[in-house]
Amino acid sequence: MYCAEENRYDGRMQYKKCGNSGVYLPRVALGLWHNFGSVDPYENQRALIHKAFDSGITLFDLANNYGPVYGSAEENFGRIMEQDMRPYRDEMIIASKAGYDMWPGPYGNGGSRKYLMASLDQSLKRMKLDYVDIFYHHRPDPDTPLEETMGALSDIVRQGKALYVGISNYSAEQTKAAAEILKKNGTPLLIHQPKYSMLNRWVEDGLLDTLEEAGAGSICFSPLAQGMLTDRYVNGIPADSRAAREHFLKSNSITPEFLEKIKKLSEVAAERGQTLAQMALSWVLRGDRVTTVLIGASKVSQIDDNVKIIGHLDFSEEELQRIECILAE
Ligand SMILES: NC(=O)c1ccc[n+]([C@@H]2O[C@H](COP(=O)([O-])OP(=O)(O)OC[C@H]3O[C@@H](n4cnc5c(N)ncnc54)[C@H](OP(=O)(O)O)[C@@H]3O)[C@@H](O)[C@H]2O)c1
């Protein structure tokens, strides 16, 4: 039987208010996009959730289609909830999403009220939950009026099936419009989930400003660029890595030029007393604009490594400059 680490709130994790809301989020959160599907060993999944929770990670991020197969990450998470985590439900922020392809026909994709309402009902059944803490629209849908999608999110909150609403992959302009509708509906935008790392900096071009104006927080996904900003690939492509599976991360992105950059970034990290992974995560949280980094992990040791960034989020001007130069090369 799992019994959570007693000292999990001893300061090993820090929590930050999400935008103008009253809810605190851990600075590091765990996502279940990879390594939690029906193709992945269940006992490792349990171990990852336990390690995360024991480390003070209270936020677990899912989506209807995480797997493979679609839905299986939510099913496995539901099994872990039943087996281990039920006593801790009120200490957990559990998020899910709908927006990408999920089931056949015209109602299993996009941003319609029909899709979002049906999908969340399915997600709750798979996860064996009465409600999720955050429900996101996973990506903008140009073919659905924004009022319809945001109206569905607001009604989901009124139905008690989600406590807060979020959006993901929306541009700064789309975010502004969505936040205005949600505010009028009386269910303010809690959070945006964008991609952000040293290798993908689009959020710096307006989105973070828009979120500050809207009073919303941010949880940034793939902060390690799916493992590229770590030591995972310095000696080739390990058989158990994401790049080896060629699933979303392609092995041809690991070029000799890229590895040269990794080597230089690792030197800066070492001088800071960090691993490259740790420095890449701290960098996303630098300056306190981003609420949370949303990591993935295939091994318990990776979670251990990543949560050690707490207390080491500051950079000197010189370090930031050196990183800029390496990234620009
Ligand atoms: N909203 C969206 O559209 C969207 C899209 C993508 C992701 N997400 C969310 O963001 C979460 C995180 O995404 P991600 O998995 O791409 O994040 P990531 O943190 O950039 O990459 C995670 C991968 O990096 C490697 N890794 C992690 N820590 C490491 C360490 N300390 N040392 C060496 N390697 C390490 C592991 O690769 P190996 O598996 O090779 O060991 C791990 O699977 C997802 O689970 C999901 O919840 C959302």
Image (cartoon, rainbow, N blue to C red):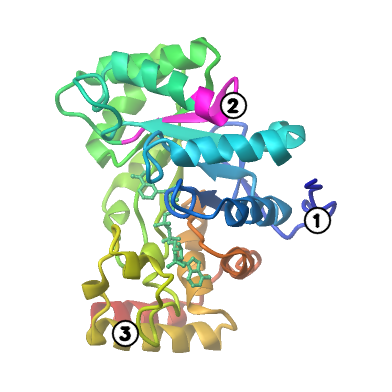
Identify which residue, 193 or 31, lies in the foreground: 31
Instruction: For the residues labelled 3 and 2, say whether their Cβ atoms are less than 8 Å apart.
Output: no
Which of the 4 quarters of the picture holds residue 89? top right
Other residues around mark 2 within 10 Å, as few (<14) / some (14–19) / many (≥20): some
Q: Is 220 a magenta residue?
A: no
Q: Residue at x 24, y 19 (%)?
A: 107
The relative height of residue 47 versus residue 77 in the rendered view (above or below) is below
Q: Amino acid at mark 2?
A: Lys
Of marks 3 and 2, which one's residue comes earlier in the chain? 2
**Under tag 1, what secondary structure?**
loop
Q: Quadrant of ligand 1?
A: bottom left
- In which quadrant is the C terminus drawn? bottom left
Q: Which residue is mark 3?
A: 259
Check the image and report above or below for 133 versus 285.
Answer: above
Say whether disc 1 or disc 3 marks the residue closer to the N-terminus. 1
Mark 3 neighbour class, 10 Å CA radius: few under 14, some 14 to 19, many 20 or more: some
Residue to which mark 1 is pinned: 10
For label 2, the SS is loop
Residue shown at 40%/39% (left/top)? 192
**Residue 164 at x, y = what percent?**
51, 26
Q: Name above or below for residue 231 compared with residue 6.
A: below
Mark 1 Cα-neighbour bin, 10 Å: few <14, some 14–19, many ≥20: few
User: How far, Cα to Cα, is label 2 from label 1?
Assistant: 30 Å
Looking at the image, residue 187 sits to the left or right of residue 171; the answer is right
What residue does disc 2 label? 128
Residue type (three-letter) at the residue carrying disc 1: Asp
Q: Which residues are magenta?
A: 124-138
Q: Amino acid at mark 3?
A: Leu
